[in-house]
Image (tube, rainbow, N blue to C red):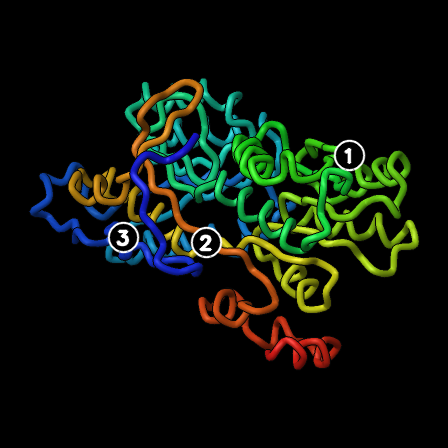
């Protein structure tokens, strides 16, 4: 899946939504005859807790934005499935029974949830796929350019290895959950950069994105390849990078190879400063979550011009073609741009990152 309409970034930093024209329409009552007022209920279904972003960022940002957009009359009903597809199905069916006005769905299993998406459709409840592209008759999709995420990770890994890389260079690929469509896109993007440049000695699709599963996979790779023969590790996200590092350290590695990541988790940002992790991919959850809230409210209220302005891209899922979408830009996060990204955007305070224990490393990084 790739976007058709592309907003080109003028710099490497994540852009505001207005840079893509997404917020250029006010969406007031002149847009259309509103189908519902401000007293709306948004159902928010998030997939898991292993990644801290969902409870820490996505939920509170969406709830706050819905409140702002509805003059404090709208509300968000939230459920997290904790990586259990059956539980998410039950959660979604309850929201359908409770007749929420719209559902923002971040699927645990994009295929398994399709029948529930159809049930929502039959009940007249719009479903917007959030962060992961669910199957079934969804009304819109918002996420990041996931193949670009993988490309950024792959390019960063090659840069970290420098000019000595060749086809004899061995790396391990630690991909995400096979039930997450995003994981397939990250993997495809990374492979587009890595294939032909080096040898992928071992590749894993990591169940549920869990760090402990990545750690076990890495132990297997070390035993099979030999710890001294692993030049780098592609990790699809930060949580798994933590598990990979534990496995390498347990094997006696004191100078870690380049390791990628994604999500700019606090632990990962600190590992980047200490040199344990080479990079992460910073994705502006504020942009994604606020735009999702705007899409949900505009859809329910019948503000079609605003909804269209927020979904200028188009994507295809295995079941549905030409889905209105918005794809948010991403940026490679390294020690050089921590201040310009996660600190300036208010994701973390400098004091949260640079604890007394990391004072020397933060000074060296100019923080």
Closer to the chain start, of discs 1 and 2, is 1
Question: Is any atom of residue 176 visible in this view?
Answer: no
Where is residue 243? Give x, y as percent. Answer: 76, 48
Image position of 124 with respect to 21: above or below: above
Disc sitting over residue 71 in the figure: none
Residue assigned mark 2: 285
Near mark 3 (Cα within 10 A), the count class, few <14, some 14-19 or many ≥20, is: some
Q: Which quadrant of the rendered structure holds the N terminus?
A: top left
The image quadrant of residue 43 is top left
Q: Which residue is at 16% across, 36% downward?
A: 35
Closer to the chain start, of discs 2 and 3, is 3
Element carrying mark 2: helix
The image quadrant of residue 125 is top left
Residue assigned mark 1: 201
Residue assigned mark 3: 73
Where is residue 260? Give x, y as percent. Answer: 66, 51
Q: Which quadrant of the rendered structure holds the C terminus?
A: bottom right
Using the image as rendered, state which of residue 125 and residue 312 is in the foreground: 312
Element carrying mark 3: loop
Image position of 170 with respect to 95: above or below: below
Q: Is residue 330 left or right of residue 359?
A: left
């Amino acid at each position: 899946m790739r976007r058709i309409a592309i907003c080109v970034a003028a710099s490497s930093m994540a852009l505001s939504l207005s840079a893509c024209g997404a917020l250029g329409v006010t969406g007031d009552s002149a847009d259309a005859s509103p189908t519902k007022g401000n007293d709306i209920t948004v159902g928010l279904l998030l997939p898991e807790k292993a990644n801290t972003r969902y409870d820490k960022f996505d939920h509170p940002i969406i709830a706050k934005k819905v409140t702002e957009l509805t003059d404090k009359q709208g509300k968000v009903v939230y459920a997290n499935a904790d990586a259990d597809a059956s539980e998410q199905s039950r959660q979604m069916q309850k929201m359908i029974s409770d007749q929420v006005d719209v559902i923002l769905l971040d699927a645990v299993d994009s295929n398994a949830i399709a029948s529930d998406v159809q049930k929502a459709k039959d009940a007249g409840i719009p479903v917007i796929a959030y962060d992961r592209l669910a199957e079934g008759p969804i009304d819109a999709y918002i996420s990041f350019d996931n193949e670009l995420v993988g490309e950024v990770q792959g390019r960063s890994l090659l840069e970290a290895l420098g000019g000595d890389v060749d086809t004899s260079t061995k790396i391990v690929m630690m991909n995400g959950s096979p039930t997450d469509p995003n994981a397939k896109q990250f993997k495809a993007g990374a492979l587009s950069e890595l294939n032909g440049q080096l040898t992928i000695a071992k590749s894993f699709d990591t169940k549920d994105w869990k760090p402990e599963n990545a750690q076990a996979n890495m132990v297997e790779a070390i035993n099979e390849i030999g710890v001294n023969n692993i030049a780098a590790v592609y990790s699809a996200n930060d949580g798994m990078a933590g598990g990979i590092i534990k496995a390498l350290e347990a094997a006696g590695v004191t100078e870690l190879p380049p390791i990628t990541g994604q999500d700019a988790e606090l632990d990962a940002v600190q590992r980047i400063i200490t040199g344990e992790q080479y990079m992460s991919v910073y994705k502006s959850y504020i942009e994604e979550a606020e735009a999702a809230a705007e899409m949900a409210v505009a859809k329910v209220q019948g503000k079609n011009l605003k909804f269209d302005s927020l979904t200028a891209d188009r994507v295809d899922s295995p079941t549905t073609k030409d889905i209105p979408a918005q794809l948010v830009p991403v940026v490679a996060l390294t020690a050089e741009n921590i201040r310009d990204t996660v600190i300036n955007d208010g994701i973390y305070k400098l004091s949260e990152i640079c604890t007394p224990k990391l004072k020397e490393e933060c000074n060296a990084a100019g923080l």
